[in-house]
Image: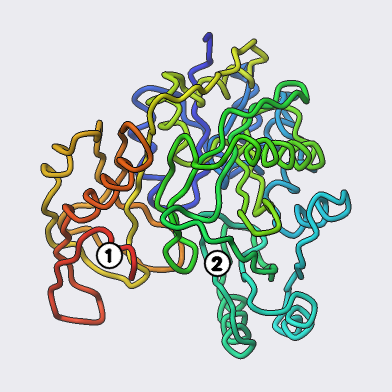
């Protein structure tokens, strides 16, 4: 592809610092925590393009792109993509989505927020992702206490976020055994939008933790076309002109409703493209950044592909032992299993989706997928101790994620 050997890293945590020596073995590492210094260092490398696959890095990448005169989302577009209040305002003013919402900057905003939005509602950071600090609020007293707690923290959601948004809770239609929401993966080239696929989901674990993806979804062609039309309208309104987007939508009795639009490849979606289309969306995004021509993938599924991630509990715990991994790998339909935790791992708890593994595979139909989904979760057994207890418990992956 003629890519420059460049890796841009924003150093903000010890974890990032520990990764520098690893990345330095095969690419040039630039410290992105100092914008002016990063721009100077990058300019010497004469970069041909810039891209990110991280929600946290979208704003940084846009600032660097502006200074280096490289194609990327402009800053105004990036703020509409990453600031949930700005995105809601843009969609509402364009008549795309009429969801009730209210920006909360101080605790004194709470009563007005409840009056305007009504409960139940979803409380989330204006700048965040992965369900970090995201909660379903069903009574005003609990909500106010949570707002007080969150606003007293040094950080809400991602770095740079100091406000909350209260949004109308979109009631999903009955969809079990599948989830009541989907995502759309889209390619944008010079304003032209092509949708790759509608991604099906499994039911969320409270408050809003995700389990992974399936291709194709169980939706009809007519409903998928309705979802594509809504997604295209939102992408245009937000000003996306180039790149790959990941749009999440709720399936309601009144039709699909937009949850949010993200200006990058969705988490776990590249793996779906690899096993089903034999393409890399990361490579396609890099080609777009370089101004290269790309072939739009056509998804004509003959099988059902899945990327399932079992998730950590909301309570802090220590993993003592894991059993059943060989049993999971032996299941007919599983092609790969990647663990992210092992004996001695401490899980911090919290509201966010914290993936503890990734399982990829394919089966003949959705019925076969539901069967293997249950079996995968049952055969993995975690020996663990919650931090508020001395008792050792043994839970399967389904039981662990439900806590």
Residue 165 horizontal/vertical position (percent): 69, 67
Q: Is residue 95 left or right of residue 279?
A: right
**Residue at image x 55%, y 18%?**
297
Query: Looking at the rendering, in which quadrant would you find the C terminus?
Result: bottom left
Q: Residues within 10 Å of mark 1 (few under 14, many from 20)?
A: some
- Identify the residue position indicated by label 1 in the image: 400
**Residue at image x 64%, y 21%?**
289
Q: Is residue 144 left or right of residue 27?
A: right
Q: Quadrant of residue 197?
A: top right
Residue 173 horizontal/vertical position (percent): 58, 60
Q: For the residue labelled by badge 1, is the local secondary structure a helix, a strand or a loop?
A: helix
Is residue 138 positioned above or below 49 on the image?
A: below
- Identify the residue position indicated by label 2 in the image: 134
Q: CA distance from mark 2 to mark 1?
A: 19 Å
Coloring scheme used: rainbow
Is the residue under label 1 in contact with that under label 2 (CB below 8 Å)?
Answer: no
Q: Residues within 10 Å of mark 2 (few under 14, many from 20)?
A: many
**Residue at image x 46%, y 22%?**
280
Residue 3 horizontal/vertical position (percent): 53, 14
Residue 369 at least partly seen: yes
Q: Is residue 370 left or right of residue 148?
A: left
Q: Quadrant of residue 306?
A: top left
How many labels were placed on the picture? Answer: 2
Is residue 163 positioned above or below 336 on the image?
A: below
Q: For the residue labelled by badge 2, is the local secondary structure a helix, a strand or a loop?
A: loop
Residue 179 horizontal/vertical position (percent): 48, 54
Is residue 356 or residue 119 the one in the foreground?
119
């Amino acid at each position: 592809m003629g890519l420059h050997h460049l890796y841009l890293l924003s150093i903000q945590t010890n974890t990032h610092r520990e990764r520098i020596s690893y990345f330095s073995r095969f690419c040039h590492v630039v410290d992105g925590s100092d914008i002016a210094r990063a721009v100077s260092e990058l300019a010497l490398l004469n970069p041909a393009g810039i891209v990110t696959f991280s929600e946290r890095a979208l704003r940084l990448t846009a600032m660097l792109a502006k200074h280096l005169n490289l194609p990327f989302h402009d800053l105004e577009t990036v703020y509409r993509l990453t600031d949930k209040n700005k995105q809601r305002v843009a969609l509402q003013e364009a008549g795309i989505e009429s969801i009730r919402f209210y920006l909360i900057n101080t605790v004194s905003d709470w009563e007005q927020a409840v009056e305007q939005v009504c409960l139940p509602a979803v409380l989330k950071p204006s700048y965040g992702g992965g369900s970090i600090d995201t909660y379903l609020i069903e009574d005003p007293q609990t909500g106010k206490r949570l707002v007080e707690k969150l606003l007293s923290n040094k950080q809400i959601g991602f770095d740079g976020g100091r406000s909350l948004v209260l949004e109308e809770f979109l009631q999903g239609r009955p969809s079990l055994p599948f989830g009541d929401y989907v995502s759309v993966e889209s390619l944008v080239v010079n304003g032209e939008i092509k949708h790759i696929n509608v991604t099906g989901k499994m039911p969320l674990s409270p408050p809003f933790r995700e389990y992974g993806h399936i291709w194709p979804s169980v939706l009809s062609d007519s409903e998928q076309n309705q979802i594509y039309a809504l997604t295209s309208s939102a992408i245009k309104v937000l000003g996306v002109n180039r790149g790959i987007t990941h749009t999440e939508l709720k399936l309601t009795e009144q039709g699909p409703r937009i949850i949010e639009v993200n200006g990058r490849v969705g988490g776990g979606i590249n793996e779906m493209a690899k096993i089903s289309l034999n393409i890399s969306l990361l490579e396609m995004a890099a080609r777009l950044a370089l101004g290269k021509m790309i072939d739009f993938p056509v998804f004509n599924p003959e099988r059902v592909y899945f990327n399932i991630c079992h998730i950590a509990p909301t309570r802090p715990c220590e993993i003592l032992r894991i059993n059943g991994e060989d049993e999971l790998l032996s299941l007919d339909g599983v092609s790969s299993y990647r663990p992210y935790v092992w004996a001695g791992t401490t899980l911090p708890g919290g509201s966010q989706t914290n993936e503890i593994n990734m399982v990829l595979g394919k089966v003949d139909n959705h019925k076969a997928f539901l069967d293997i989904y249950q079996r995968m979760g049952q055969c993995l057994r975690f020996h663990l101790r919650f931090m508020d207890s001395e008792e050792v418990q043994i839970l399967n992956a389904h039981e662990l994620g439900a806590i």
